[in-house]
Image: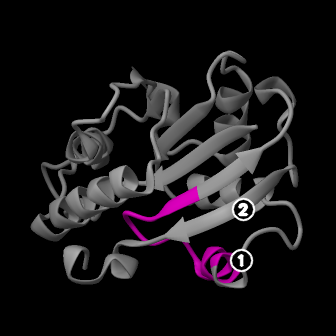
Amino acid sequence: MHQLLLLRHAKAVAEGPGLPDPARPLTARGRRDALAMGRALHALGLQPDLVLASSARRIQETLECLEPWPEAPLIETIDRLYLASAPEILRLVNEVAETVRSVMVIGHNPGLRACAVLLAAPGSGPERARRMLAEGLPTGTLVEFACGGAWAHLAAGQARLARVLSPRDLGDEGT
């Protein structure tokens, strides 16, 4: 059984003159939320073997807040993950080596949420998780899936939704 973790980057500053979208850093709230999510990941024992991350600054800063890991994962920064569509994210996951048990993708909406919705097996997962995913994917939110079979064959509707965890779920630790 494989584990797929989809994490939307934490809250970033708004795009503005002189600040192109890929260069947007995290806000203070985003940094707090990402640090809290990192603590929650470690407390839950969610340890990826491989992290696929967009090259955007807000993604890289979110990733930094998750460190240090109990066991350092292999981290691949992939330019094509910047604003990637659901099919593109799925193609990247399909390329993962079978020896990798757990993969984390840190990316952007709307593609990341669309990928989560695409992968979720109908009716799988706790009711609350299904409802949260249906309502959207706020910044800093994690979606965990259990995936049977080979990464290369993962397709729409074939992953069991295990949990959706947002910074708000973390109480005083997250926003």
Residue at 73 percent across and 63 percent down: it is 117
Q: Which residues are magenta?
A: 129-143
**Tag 2: amino acid:** Leu
**Tag 1: amino acid:** Pro
Question: Where does residue 41 sit, x and y in percent of width and height?
Answer: 39, 53
Q: Nearer the viewer, residue 72 or 52?
A: 72
Q: Residue 132 lies in magenta, yes or no?
A: yes
Question: Where does residue 120 sit, x and y in percent of width and height?
Answer: 78, 60
Question: Where does residue 175 sit, x and y in percent of width and height?
Answer: 25, 79
Determine whether, in the image, residue 31 is placed left or right of residue 169: left
Q: Are marks 1 and 2 in contact (CB under 8 Å)?
A: yes
Residue at 83 percent across and 40 percent down: it is 148
Count neighbours of disc 1 (C-alpha within 10 A) and say few if under 14, some if 14 to 19, many if 20 or more.
few
Give the label on residue 62, or none.
none
The residue tagged 1 is: 126
Could you tell which of marks 1 and 2 lies nearer the N-terminus? 1
Vertical order, 42 against 55 (above or below): below
The residue tagged 2 is: 161
Determine whether, in the image, residue 63 is placed left or right of residue 156: left
